Image (tube, helix red, strand yellow):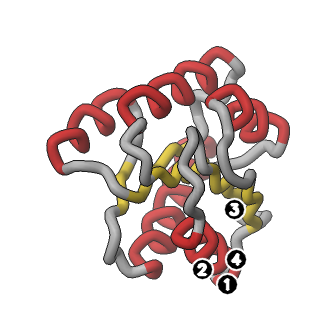
Amino acid sequence: MSRPIRVLIAKPGLDGHDRGAKVIARALRDAGMEVIYSGLRQTPEQVAAAAIQEDVDVVGLSILSGAHNVLFPEILKLLKERGGEDILVIAGGIIPDKDIANLKAIGIREIFLPGTPTQALVEFIQKAAREKVARAQT
């Protein structure tokens, strides 16, 4: 890419713990990405609006509260309604294995669970960004 990859890290819902999100944000910055951290307790509307306003390539959703099956579909719907259907959406946090396939089926590109090396996340985003640029050029 001719510019840094832009990533929004968002904490949707009432979850008040953000240590993991901050670790991820730092790892992405260290890898040369431009990271916007939206802060705690964001509504789906706030997440989608920030993603569009900041013109991000990636939205990383971090959740520990268990509300992923409600909040993530709403965020995806709002992104699509606002012209952000090409934004890569990934997620991390405490997400039960039984929910992962459904979340991927609705459009969450990848889910990173606790213990995932930060380098794996960095490489996933870099690869996805390269693929997006290649598709746009063809």
Secondary element at image label 2: helix
Q: Nearer the viewer, mark 3 or mark 4?
A: 4
Dot 2 amino acid type: Ala
Dot 1 amino acid type: Asp
- The answer to whether residue 1 is above or below residue 11 is below
Q: Are marks 3 and 2 in contact (CB under 8 Å)?
A: no
Secondary element at image label 1: helix
Q: Nearer the viewer, mark 1 or mark 3?
A: 1
> Mark 2 — residue?
27
Cα gap from disc 1 to disc 2, whole angstroms: 5 Å
Residue 29's tag is 4
Residue 30's tag is 1
Q: Are marks 4 and 1 in contact (CB under 8 Å)?
A: yes
Secondary element at image label 4: helix
Mark found first going from the N terminus, 3 or 4: 3
What percent of the width, then of the height, locates residue 92?
42, 57
Pointer 2: residues within 10 angstroms few (<14), some, or many (20+)? some
- Extreme top residue here? 81
* Rendering quarter of residue 22: bottom right
Q: Are marks 4 and 2 in contact (CB under 8 Å)?
A: yes
What percent of the width, then of the height, locates residue 112?
36, 61
Cα gap from disc 3 to disc 4, whole angstroms: 10 Å
Dot 3 amino acid type: Ile
Pointer 1: residues within 10 angstroms few (<14), some, or many (20+)? few
Secondary element at image label 3: loop
What percent of the width, then of the height, locates residue 38?
74, 51
Identify which residue is drawn at 59% across, 55% down. Answer: 16
Cα gap from disc 1 to disc 3, whole angstroms: 12 Å
Mark found first going from the N terminus, 3 or 2: 3
